[in-house]
Image: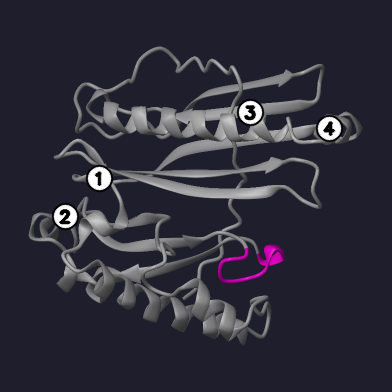
Amino acid sequence: MLVRHILSLVFATAGLVACRDGADRTNDGDTPPPAKTDVAKDTQSGREGLYTMELKLPDLPPKAAPLRGAIDRYVERQKESFLASLDAPGATARARELPWDLNLDIAVAARTDRFINVQVDGSAFTGGAHPAPIVDSFTYDLDDQRVVGINDLFDDPHAAESAFAAEARRQLLTALDDQDEPLASDSAQIDEGTAPGKDHFRVFSLLTGPDDKVHGLTFIFPPYQVASYAAGPQAVDVPSESFSAYLKPEYREAFR
């Protein structure tokens, strides 16, 4: 069944220094994070009030230092992109009329005995008709101590993506006929937005169980990918049995 997430909206910070509530509060790399994961929050404005920026960062264990580094680099890239947009012709005048806004919320969404999954939800308003959503994710392999993408999990990424696409299309096409709230999309947009081999399944979270294993993947599609902007981000749950045959041997024990 299609799960519709109205994700909060993203973006990064300019000259923003986040105090991370002291240090990472864990005894070792395998201790689960506290329930409250966003321990840093700061808001700043710049260029005489032309813009406002807000940042939240998650609390992470020391063992996840490479993940922290990847997140910090991501934030810096988003910050640079946003500030560069203010240098476009006419941007300053537009921002004086209606200040621009950058919001970035990064939080731990799931954790198992092998992975930490972090979601990025936010928006950037740069004078358009509406804020531009940014939806992203990071998945960290605690054993190998590295960030892994969706293709890193599989021996045959294309076969795995074909399985994802089949299930995503089934759920999204069913949602088109929802009597209470039909999905604002059509079959052509759904087919295009779920086509394998085009980085369409890059953003995902983990479905977890009481056994501390991954029971499936939740794929998150930003607005416009499979439905209209008004429909918001769409999320599809794909159970492990749909793709377990394609997992690399070293990851099979991490899934159920």
The x, y position of residue 105, in whole percent, is 55, 37
- Is residue 210 shown left or right of residue 106? left
Helix or strand or loop: what does disc 3 sit on? strand
Q: In this view, does 156 lie above or below 18?
A: below
The x, y position of residue 60, in whole percent, is 34, 28
Q: Which residue is drawn at 62% across and 83% down?
A: 186
Q: Judge by depth and name the residue closer to the eye, 191 or 8.
A: 191
Eye-nearest disc, 4 or 3 = 4
Helix or strand or loop: what does disc 1 sit on? strand
Q: In this view, does 156 lie above or below 97?
A: below
- Is residue 202 shown left or right of residue 230? left
The magenta segment is 224-231
Residue 12 visible here: no
Q: Is residue 63 above or below residue 131?
A: above
Look at label 1 and name its amino acid.
Answer: Phe
The image's mark for residue 95 is: 4
Look at label 2 and name its amino acid.
Answer: Ala
**Alpha carbon distance from label 4 to label 2:** 48 Å
Q: Judge by depth and name the residue closer to the eye, 251 or 193.
A: 193
N-term-proximal mark, 3 vs 2: 3
N-term-proximal mark, 4 vs 2: 4
Residue 72 lies in what quarter of the image?
top left
* Residue extending furthest toward the left: 249
* Residue extending furthest toward the top: 22
Helix or strand or loop: what does disc 2 sit on? helix
The image's mark for residue 254 is: 2
Helix or strand or loop: what does disc 4 sit on? helix
Look at label 4 and name its amino acid.
Answer: Ala
